[in-house]
């Protein structure tokens, strides 16, 4: 079985490449943006200079935040794809992002402002929205006739529309300022949030990585079908409950910060699966790294393309992700099979 | 005296009010080869799935090795019971080796990699099913017959005491049907593994002496050794159509043919 040993080496090499790529992106992209920054200025002796401030106070935390958000979205997408055995689902297509947005929109519209046990009220509301949406989709997928790809996607679209129309209603009845705040935030963007937000997002991202990695054997078995997973010894009910609760925290947490950002959760795990294979022991870290790298790059594009303005990063990922989704649908599903 | 390992007492199962299994009581001994037969919708697969808790029911009781089934952790069941499904699921592109290795789930702790013992079990399962040469192929590119052997190897990698088979050969061509049925029969007699096999193939029942459980409309209507159960009259009661038994000239083994076909 020499080939298999070699395989393992190749997979570790891919992970190393992704890690190095991530470091390159994290260290170079803070220099890009509507104001280019030269290397000399960031280590200057007078910390008051504007380049110094832009680099250390605004851009470094922003790039890292984009990285964490991308990693979280990608991991959530990967888990959904394994549990639902369906390569076209992600937090966005399942309506979970909309559910979280719905929670956050209610928070904004009601003009609440509170913190519970150190967790901001808006995160708490989007968490509840995400739980609600996942519960609906899970219930729909469990209905007697069995879940097909088409049914899952339709359920996701229905859930999405449902929440988005309620959000529109909320915007309609709330004041102009709240309404504008909601619609700007719905576009999805990573703005200047500083280090506190970065730390929160990093905790969520690494906690998510750790727990999902812990379940990588279980996720492998999920992809072979629920019955087979149970027969091999997976406690499916318990595992699904833990994973969905975790993802609700992850999605709720970042939607509260950045709004719904689409398609990272579908692109990243898919590309990683093509590259490193479907074994979640390797796929999990690869997806984390690739998702982070991808969104950090998209965000750099978002703030460099049209200076001095910024494009919301959700617009960039959707422009890239829409065609990718269509390609996937066409290339993989033209024979109406659901093989990957 | 063989040891009793599965006890099913007064067991019922319902899907949405509809009773699929009704007051089933039966006993299975260690090393038994059990075939569950019956018409479509009789509850055969449901009974099989209740044995490793793919499905659960509160009505009646199942005991496994003297312990209540509900008292087991799912992982413990994964070490005692192997399962081979009908196998029509779409699969992600794992290699055969990776897929069979997933049968070791119940033995591998989280975060850890597979041990030499796991690799030995997988290689043994691959050689027992004769698919060593497929080890590096992706499972989604296999033919139906090859894939069914991979499912069987996965179940054997569980190193179970009991092997559950849910019509594993129903969708296969005749060559693969025969090959896999003989394979299962040989594995059971060589390893002394208890096999519980849902089947539609009556010819399979003539492979050798075995225990038969016949279900009809959720009730157990016959149970016992094949020599006693396999009579034209009983088969007519079970399936609602007449059969004739023809002895094969050289071996004396019986053929079962539906009368309507003659």
Image (cartoon, coloured by chain):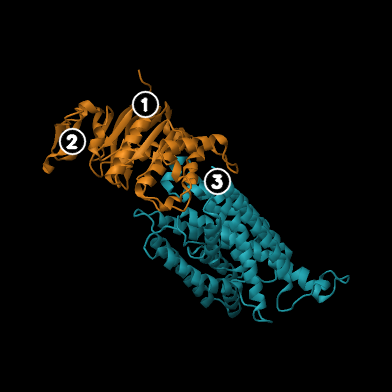
Query: On the rendered structure, is B206 left or right of B182?
Result: left
Q: In which quarter of the image is residue A30?
A: bottom right
Give the vertical position of A325 relative to A7 (above or below). Answer: below
Residue A75 on image: x %, y %: 57, 57
Mark 1 or 2: in front is 2
Q: Label 3 marks which chain's residue?
A: A
State the residue position of label 3: A4
SS at badge 2: strand
- Chain A color in figure: cyan
SS at badge 1: loop
- Judged from this view, the residue extending furthest toward the top is B1
Mark number for residue A319? none
Distance CA(mark 1)–CA(mark 2): 26 Å
Query: On the rendered structure, is A255 left or right of A200?
Result: left
Distance CA(mark 3)–CA(mark 2): 47 Å
Distance CA(mark 3)–CA(mark 1): 36 Å
Residue A31 on image: x %, y %: 74, 72
Mark number for residue B256? 2
Give the vertical position of B225 relative to A308 (above or below). Answer: above
Q: Earlier in the sequence, mark 1 or mark 2?
A: 1
Identify which residue is drawn at 48% across, 50% down. Answer: B94
Identify which residue is drawn at 35% across, 35% down. Answer: B184
Q: How crowded is mark 3: few (under 14 residues within 10 Å), some or many (20 or more)?
A: some
Q: Label 2 marks which chain's residue?
A: B
Chain represented in orange: B
Residue B97 on image: x %, y %: 49, 44
Q: Quadrant of residue A146?
A: bottom left
Q: Viewer-proximal residue, A278 or A92? A: A278
Quarter occupied by the N terminus of chain B: top left
Q: Is residue A287 in view from this perspective?
A: yes
């Amino acid at each position: 079985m020499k080939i298999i040993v070699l395989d393992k080496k190749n997979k570790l090499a891919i992970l190393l490449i992704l890690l190095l790529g991530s470091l390159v992106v994290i260290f170079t992209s803070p220099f890009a943006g509507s104001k280019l920054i030269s290397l000399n200025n960031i280590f200057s002796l007078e910390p008051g200079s504007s380049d110094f401030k832009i680099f250390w106070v605004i851009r470094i935390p922003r790039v890292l935040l984009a990285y964490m958000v991308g990693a979280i979205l990608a991991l959530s997408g990967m888990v959904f794809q394994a549990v639902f055995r369906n390569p076209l689902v992600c937090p966005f297509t399942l309506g979970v992002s909309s559910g979280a947005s719905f929670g956050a929109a209610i928070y904004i519209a009601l003009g609440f402002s509170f913190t519970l046990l150190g967790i901001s009220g808006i995160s708490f509301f989007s968490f509840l929205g995400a739980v609600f949406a996942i519960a609906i989709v899970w219930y729909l997928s469990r209905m007697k006739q069995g879940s097909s790809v088409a049914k899952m996607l339709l359920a996701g679209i229905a859930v999405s529309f449902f929440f988005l129309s309620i959000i529109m209603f909320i915007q309609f009845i709330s004041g102009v300022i709240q309404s504008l705040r909601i619609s700007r935030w719905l576009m999805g963007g990573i703005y200047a949030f500083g280090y506190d937000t970065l730390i929160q997002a990093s905790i969520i991202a690494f906690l998510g990585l750790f727990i999902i990695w812990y379940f990588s054997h279980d996720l492998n078995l999920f992809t072979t079908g629920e019955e087979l997973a149970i027969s091999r010894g997976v406690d499916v009910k318990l595992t699904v409950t833990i994973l969905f609760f975790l993802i609700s925290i992850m999605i709720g947490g970042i939607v509260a910060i950045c709004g719904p950002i689409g398609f990272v959760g579908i692109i990243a795990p898919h590309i990683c699966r093509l590259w490193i294979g479907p074994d979640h022991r390797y796929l999990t870290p690869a997806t984390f790294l690739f998702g982070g790298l991808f969104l950090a790059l998209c965000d750099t594009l978002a703030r460099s393309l049209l200076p001095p303005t910024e494009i919301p990063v959700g617009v960039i990922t959707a422009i890239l992700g829409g065609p990718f989704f269509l390609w996937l649908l066409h290339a993989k599903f033209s024979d109406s099979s659901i093989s990957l | 005296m063989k040891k009793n390992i599965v006890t099913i007492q007064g067991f019922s199962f319902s899907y949405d009010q509809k009773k699929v299994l009704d007051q089933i009581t039966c006993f299975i001994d260690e090393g038994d080869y059990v075939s569950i037969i019956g018409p479509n919708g009789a509850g055969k697969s449901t009974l099989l799935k209740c044995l490793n808790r793919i499905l659960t029911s509160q009505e009646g009781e199942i005991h496994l090795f003297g312990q209540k089934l509900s008292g087991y952790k799912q992982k413990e069941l994964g070490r005692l019971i192997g399962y081979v499904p009908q196998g029509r699921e779409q699969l992600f592109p794992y290699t055969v080796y990776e897929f069979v290795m997933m049968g070791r789930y119940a033995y591998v702790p989280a975060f850890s990699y597979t041990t030499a013992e796991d690799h030995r079990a997988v290689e043994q399962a691959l050689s027992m099913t004769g698919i060593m040469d497929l080890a590096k192929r992706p499972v989604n590119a296999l033919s139906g017959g090859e894939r069914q052997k991979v499912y069987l190897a996965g179940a054997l990698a569980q190193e179970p005491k009991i092997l559950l088979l849910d019509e594993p050969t129903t969708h296969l061509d005749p060559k693969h049907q025969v090959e896999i049925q003989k394979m299962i029969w040989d594995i059971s007699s060589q390893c002394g593994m208890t096999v519980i096999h849902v089947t539609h193939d009556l010819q399979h029942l003539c492979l050798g002496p075995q225990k038969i459980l016949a279900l009809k409309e959720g009730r157990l209507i016959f149970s016992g050794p094949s020599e006693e159960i396999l009579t034209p009259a009983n088969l007519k009661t079970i399936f609602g159509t007449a059969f004739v038994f023809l002895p094969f000239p050289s071996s004396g083994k019986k053929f079962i043919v539906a009368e309507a076909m003659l």
